[in-house]
């Protein structure tokens, strides 16, 4: 995440000026002096191999029972090796979020809840996302704290600008599949695409959106 956190002196100065602070230390003025720590009394760092050996040795102290009475089927099963390969295939995953399904749904939900609460506490705006179908393109527009326009067109690549409060990024969208059956009453839209940030591929995504007319 360090890449996404502004750390240059110019950026720090701009943020401090915006909130009327002279130095970063002023942000902690409400913390009692005796609670501030200049240096943590931590041991020297270890190599990855040393950490692995130490943690493995600690794990050996655990006692693993053959039978665990947790209920709900939460006990040891024989799972054929082919299962992991089959269930991990893209066509068998219900990708109802822009990224990996299941776990990311919870992450996206937490981000949404966090953003909503921050907006309520600070009075700052969030980000609104809208889709527009302009055959043969689908255009995703984000406006608010983050501004961007992503253009999806099967077999084509489009470049857009991703604007955040901390700077701008160039985003390339290469769409491999775009299908929809949208009508006046709604329908289903499926988009598969790869995304590159500053011309470096960061992921290949798929999402399906079901539209219903109220």
Image (spheres, rainbow, N blue to C red):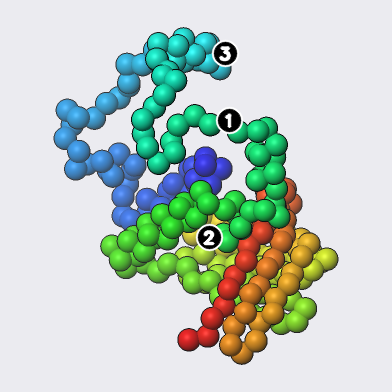
Identify residue for label 1: 78
How far apart in space, not on screen, are marks 2 and 1 (Cα)?
A: 48 Å
| Quadrant hosting residue 152 | bottom right
Identify residue for label 3: 49
| Quadrant hosting residue 192 | bottom right
Q: Residue furthest right?
A: 155
Residue closest to the eye, 13 or 123: 123
Identify residue for label 2: 164
How far apart in space, not on screen, are marks 2 and 3 (Cα)?
A: 39 Å
- 214 is higher (above) or lower (below) than 19: below
Q: Residue at x 41, y 24 (%)?
A: 67
**Camera sees residue 102:** yes
How far apart in space, not on screen, are marks 3 and 1 (Cα)?
A: 31 Å
Mark 3 secondary-structure assignment: helix
Mark closer to the observer (3, 1): 1
Where residue 38 appears, as percent x and y from the top left, is 30, 24
Mark closer to the observer (2, 3): 3
Crowdedness near tag 2: few (<14), some (14–19) or many (≥20) residues, C-alpha within 10 Å: few
Crowdedness near tag 3: few (<14), some (14–19) or many (≥20) residues, C-alpha within 10 Å: few
Of pointers 2 and 3, the one earlier in the residue sequence: 3
**Camera sees residue 141:** no
Mark 2 secondary-structure assignment: strand
Mark 1 secondary-structure assignment: loop
Check if mark 3's residue and mark 1's residue have beta carbons within 8 Å: no
Of pointers 3 and 1, the one earlier in the residue sequence: 3
Check if mark 2's residue and mark 3's residue have beta carbons within 8 Å: no
- 103 is higher (above) or lower (below) than 181: above
Q: Which mark is residue 97?
A: none
Crowdedness near tag 1: few (<14), some (14–19) or many (≥20) residues, C-alpha within 10 Å: few
Q: Residue at x 51, y 48 (%)?
A: 103
- 150 is higher (above) or lower (below) than 103: below
Q: Residue at x 56, y 43 (%)?
A: 3
């Amino acid at each position: 995440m360090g890449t996404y956190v502004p750390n240059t002196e110019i950026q720090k100065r701009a943020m401090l000026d915006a909130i009327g602070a002279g130095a970063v230390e002023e942000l902690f003025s409400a913390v009692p002096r005796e609670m501030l720590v200049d240096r943590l009394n931590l041991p020297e760092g270890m190599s990855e191999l040393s950490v692995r050996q130490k943690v493995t040795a600690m794990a050996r102290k655990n006692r693993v029972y053959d039978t665990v009475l947790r209920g709900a089927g939460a006990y040891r099963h024989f799972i054929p090796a082919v299962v992991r390969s089959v269930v991990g295939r893209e066509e068998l995953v219900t990708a109802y979020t822009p990224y990996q399904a299941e776990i990311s749904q919870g992450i996206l939900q937490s981000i949404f809840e966090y953003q909503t609460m921050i907006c309520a506490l600070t009075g700052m705006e969030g980000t609104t996302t809208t889709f527009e179908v302009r055959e043969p393109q689908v255009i995703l527009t984000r406006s608010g704290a983050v501004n961007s326009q992503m253009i999806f067109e099967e077999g084509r690549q489009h470049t857009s600008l991703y604007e955040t409060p901390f700077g701008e990024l160039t985003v390339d969208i290469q769409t491999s599949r775009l299908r929809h059956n949208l009508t006046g009453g709604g329908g289903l839209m499926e988009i598969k695409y790869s995304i590159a940030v500053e011309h470096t591929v960061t992921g290949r995504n798929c999402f399906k959106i079901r539209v219903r007319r109220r």
